[in-house]
Structures are given as C-alpha cells and as structure tokens.
C-alpha cells in the first residue's frame, strides 16, 4: 500500500475530472448558468476529497483519531464481530464537510479485513452502526493488544475504500482508506485504554489524541 502525499485523495480525481469536463462543455455551449453550477460542483468535490497532512503526537502510547468529525458516543461493550472481547468503542460521525481520509489510530499489523454488505441508513444512528455496509480492519498492536477500525457507510455514502492489506504493518497516523460522501468510523480499543475525549468533541484524523493505552494491570475484568 502506497501512502499518498498529495493534497487531494486519489479517489477524487475521476469525480473532479468529470465535473471539470462537464463545466467546460457547458461553457463552450454558452450555457453560462449551468457552467457555473457544474463549476461550483467541481469545487465542492475538490474540497470534499482534500487530503491535508497531519502531525501525530510524539507519545508512543497516544491513540489518535482515525477520522475527522464529531464523537457520537463512547461505550464499553462486548464485540462479537471483530475482536470477540470486551472493548471500549468510540464512534465518530463525519458529515460531508469533514475530511474523509481515514488514518490508523495506533501502530499495528493487520490480522484480517472484514467486509460486511448492508443497508444505507443514516450513519449517526444506532441502526446505521449495526446494519450498514462496513469494512473492519482488525490489527495487533505493538503491545500485543488487538484493536479494530471499522469504516461504516452512511445514508449518502455508497463507497468504502480500504487500502489496508492482511499482514501489512501500518504506522500510527498512516492513511488507510476513505469513505465517500458522509459516513462514520467506529474504533474498538482494549479495556485498559484511557479515553480522554467525550461525546460531542470535534476531532481530526491522525492528530487529535483520543486517549492513551494503559498498562495491562489497568485492564478491567
């Protein structure tokens, strides 16, 4: 998997090219209003697929956000889909104005990729989190603790792109995928992780610290 170093996500170029071409055709035909309308659409698509650089914190035990957006909820639960263990689950909702490139919250090696077809309910609802199309990346971290990052499609989002591959080692903050046009990311963390954000907080992928990994003695039974 090659890490993108450009300001626009690679997946955005076809959309941008089509919109720009359509705007040019409209202008040549002197359909000025429609040319401006499509040009505005082209500008929005370019904005949507922006891919800015982010600076990760220095602490090795820091857990960074995998997505831009707003913290929907934080809960302790038993996860049957990915880790088959008690976890702390952090849900992040991305609206269409957020950066949609997803990044690794911790260093780890990919154990498996779990793709699940599903519905397209609003991603900020409980039903959307359970029933929507999703792609989960399950990893083992450097501390031998497993965690999972799950990309979830939304009401408008209809395409999940996951570039991670089984057996690949990914560094914290590295880009691993994108969800197009509004979506959600759920993060499943070990129970001993110290979460330091709250529901409603605005976070940035690869930059905002969600918390820190605790020691094994801190893990709850």
Image (cartoon, grey):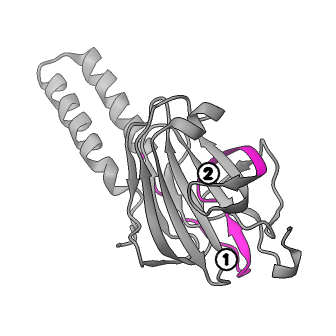
Residue 115 placement (x, y as % from top left): 42, 53
Tell me the quadrant of the picture where the N terminus can be found. bottom left
Nearer to the camera, 187 or 207:
187
Q: Is residue 160 above or below residue 43?
A: below
Residue furthest to the left: 29
Seen in the image, is 29 located left or right of residue 44? left
Residue at image location 29% in from the left, 26% down from the top = 38
Rendered image quadrant of residue 114:
bottom left
Q: Report whether residue 208 is seen.
A: no
Seen in the image, is 3 located left or right of residue 141? left
Q: Name the residue under label 1.
A: 145
Q: Mark 1–mark 2 contact, CB under 8 Å?
A: no
Q: In this view, does 39 lie above or below 137?
A: above
Characterize the magenta stretch by its predominant secondary structure: loop
Q: In this view, does 127 lie above or below 51?
A: above
Highlighted magenta segment, given as a residue range: 49-76
Bin the neighbour count of mark 1 within 10 Å (Cα to Cα): few under 14, some 14-19, many 20 and up.
few
Seen in the image, is 19 located left or right of residue 56? left
Q: Name the residue under label 2.
A: 186
């Amino acid at each position: 998997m090659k890490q993108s170093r450009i300001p626009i996500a690679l997946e955005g170029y076809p959309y941008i090219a089509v919109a720009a071409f359509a705007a040019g055709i409209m202008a040549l035909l002197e359909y000025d209003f429609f040319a401006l309308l499509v040009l505005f659409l082209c500008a929005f698509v370019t904005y949507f697929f922006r891919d800015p650089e982010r600076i990760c914190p220095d602490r090795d035990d820091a857990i960074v956000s995998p997505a831009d957006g707003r913290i929907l909820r934080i809960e302790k639960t038993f996860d049957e889909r990915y880790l088959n263990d008690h976890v702390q689950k952090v849900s992040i909702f991305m609206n269409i104005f957020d950066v949609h490139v997803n990044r690794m919250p911790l260093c780890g090696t990919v154990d498996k990729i779990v793709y699940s077809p599903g519905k397209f309910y609003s991603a900020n609802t409980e039903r959307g989190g359970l029933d929507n199309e999703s792609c989960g990346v399950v990893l083992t971290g450097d501390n031998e603790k497993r965690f999972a990052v799950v990309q979830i499609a939304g009401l408008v989002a209809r395409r999940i792109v996951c570039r991670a591959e089984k057996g690949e080692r990914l560094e914290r903050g590295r880009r691993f995928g994108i969800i197009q046009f509004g979506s959600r990311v759920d993060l499943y963390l070990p129970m001993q992780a110290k979460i330091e954000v709250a529901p409603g907080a605005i976070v940035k992928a690869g930059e905002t610290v969600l918390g820190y990994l605790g020691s094994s003695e801190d893990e709850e039974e």
